[in-house]
Amino acid sequence: MDWEWLKEFARGMIKPVAALAVVLMAMLLSYLQRLGLEGEMIYSIFRSFLQLSIIGFVLQFIFNQSSSIWIVVAYLFMVSVAGYTAGQRAKHVPRGKYVAGASILAGTAVTMFLLILLNVFPFTPRYIIPVAGMMVGNAMTVTGVTMKRLRDDIKIQMTLVETALALGATPRQATMQQVKRSLVIALSPVLDNAKTVGLISLPGAMTGLIMGGASPLEAIQLQIVVMNMLIGASTVSSIMSTYMSWPSFFTKAYQLQTKVFISD
């Protein structure tokens, strides 16, 4: 068996191990300030090392495969984990994990399809998996915030919503302001990031390309594509989550599901 890949991996880990010096500094400061975070820091670093190492070997395996099915498998796995995580944030939304997963799947799949259709990215693991990961991660955050904020706003303004329903409004009409507010709040960080990209900090994709030896102009072109796709995927996912969430807040008789809004 050829173990050359393992030797190469071990040699490549010299710099990451050396970078542990800054973690030791953080642990020392935590100890001196009696924060009690030393154990948490060790656990976090160990877990990140383990997760990244595993995903590195998995990606290496997928990149070496000729079948496109592995792209779909990796993508669906990311969406599943993202849906579960976003659903945990919006834990009081009925079927929150399924709603979040379906919303993230819809937003990222539509965006990815358009990018491939327009020949922005080729349908290969080396391009699609990293791009899908960025979109899914961003859509996960936005979707979780949207669902949680929508439920919380309706809870705070139950009297207003019930009054609108009593006057003949449909559930969607009665909660239109809450839906808009939750979407604006969830999408604002994505838009703010697009407004300030390159001015405050260099994004990860751009930084990675430059450090890898690519021209800054090439890195900028890719980063523009990344920002565009993040806005597109996040917007579709967050809007989809509102359409899938609000029906569970009401009964068939167009009354609020009181049990949904009892717990905090």
Image (cartoon, helix red, strand yellow):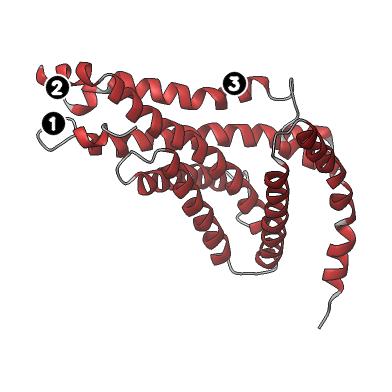
Q: Do the CB atoms of the residues marked 2 and 1 lie less than 8 Å apart?
A: yes
- Element under disc 1: loop
Three-letter amino acid code of the residue under disc 3: Asp
Q: What kind of element bears circle 2?
A: helix
Q: Earlier in the sequence, mark 3 or mark 1?
A: 3
- Which of the two marks, 3 or 1, is nearer to us in this view? 1
Residues 38 and 84: in front is 38
Q: Amino acid at mark 1?
A: Tyr
> Looking at the image, do the residues carrying marks 3 and 2 touch, with CB atoms under 8 Å apart?
no
**Mark 2 or mark 1: whose residue is earlier in sequence:** 2
Mark 2 and mark 1: Cα distance apart in space: 7 Å
Q: Quadrant of residue 257?
A: top left
Q: Nearer the viewer, mark 3 or mark 2?
A: 2
Whole-angstrom CA distance, mark 3 to mark 1, is 37 Å
Q: Is residue 55 left or right of residue 247?
A: right
Q: Quickly name the residue at label 2.
A: 165
Q: Which residue is mark 3?
A: 192
Q: Which badge, 3 or 2, is on the more N-terminal residue? A: 2
Q: Is residue 264 visible?
A: yes
Q: Quadrant of the N terminus?
A: bottom right
